[in-house]
Image (cartoon, grey):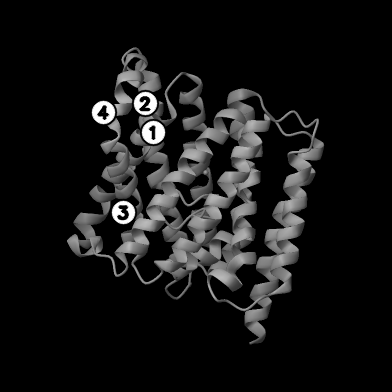
Amino acid sequence: MPRPDAGPDRASFSAPAGQAAARIAPAYGATRPLAGIVLLVLSAWALSGLDASGKWVMGAGVSLLMLCWVRYVVHLLLVLGLVLPARGAKVLRSVRPRAQLLRGGIMLLATFSFFNTLRLLPQAEATAINFLAPLIMLSLAPWLLKEPARVARWVAAGVGFLGVLIIIRPGGGLDPVGTVSGLITAILFAGQYIATRRVAVDDPLTTLIWSGAIGSLCLTAALPFILPTAWPLMAVLDPWHWLVLVSTGFWGAAGHLLQIQAYHRAPASMLAPFIYLQIISAATLGWLIWGQFPDALTWLGIVIISASGVSLGVWEWHGRKRQ
């Protein structure tokens, strides 16, 4: 999921998502840009692995809520196991706990919506629609974040939406419910990016832990209502299905930790164009696992969305250099 699943997202994301992530994970000296780019590309593959694993186990009959519970709990346990020994309990403290709660709640809804989209749409198309999210966030920033209004952002958002319209065009073969779910997901991800900026004062690892903890607690509280219908199928899953299901938490944790490390090594303005390489990993996994490959018009829409985001990132980078 470019998403902010549980940390600086693809949201985290994903100047689009990279700018939001930069607010919570500034590059400390940004002295190793090549390492940052490599880590970001690895993050994209890990997060695409999360998406593909979730889509695959849902195809095997695992319910959406059960998938999300496993994904969040495994993710949280892995992150706590890696971060707490190195940083201590102080990493759990948030300067803005209410903002963290809001962000975690929006992220949980975005996770539900994106996995539902993946259930109905090919992975590449679902991923491409999500690239609209950072453009929505940047176009709304003057009102929601009190940032200067910039015509370039609105133009980029309009061009990006044109690319989405090409992807979801009538006759394109996409499930209408999945398409609507994808657009809702993009809006939720945009809200998550905005909420991410609200918690910029916190350590990025604090945000990563809070996001995982909020989702885990909410879904665990709902477990008594989920299990009666979900468990009969879970009980007959073979070891391979269980491995893939549990791996969703691993891929999510790995993706976001790699993303944080990328932004520690390179500035967000440099990394922003490389975020769109995630469409390559999404399309590759979709083709290898399900034999789904975007047609020519869909690729045109993907290129338009990616070009609008990259162009805006380059434009704002040059604008900051001139200031």
Q: Secondary structure at mark 2?
A: helix
Q: Secondary structure at mark 3?
A: helix
The disc at residue 224 is: 4
As drawn, the residue found furthest toward the bottom would be: 323
- Label 3 neighbourhood size at 10 Å, few (<14), some (14-19), many (20+)? many
Residue 254 coordinates in the image, percent (x, y): 40, 46
- The mark lying in front, picked from 3 and 4, is 4
Depth order, front residue of 33/253:
253
Residue 87's place in the image compared with 244, above or below, is below
Instruction: Name the N-terminal-most of marks 4 and 2.
Output: 4
- The mark lying in front, picked from 2 and 3, is 3
- Label 1 neighbourhood size at 10 Å, few (<14), some (14-19), many (20+)? many
Q: Amino acid at mark 2?
A: Leu
- Measure the C-alpha gap from mark 1 to mark 3: 18 Å
The disc at residue 4 is: none
- The mark lying in front, picked from 4 and 1, is 4
Q: Is residue 74 left or right of residue 108?
A: left
- Label 2 neighbourhood size at 10 Å, few (<14), some (14-19), many (20+)? few
Q: Residue at x 37, y 39 (%)?
A: 250
Q: Which residue is mark 1?
A: 247
Residue 303 coordinates in the image, percent (x, y): 75, 49
Residue 259 coordinates in the image, percent (x, y): 46, 56
Please report contact status of discs 1 and 2: CB closer than 8 Å, yes or no: yes
Q: Which residue is mark 2?
A: 243
Q: Amino acid at mark 4?
A: Pro
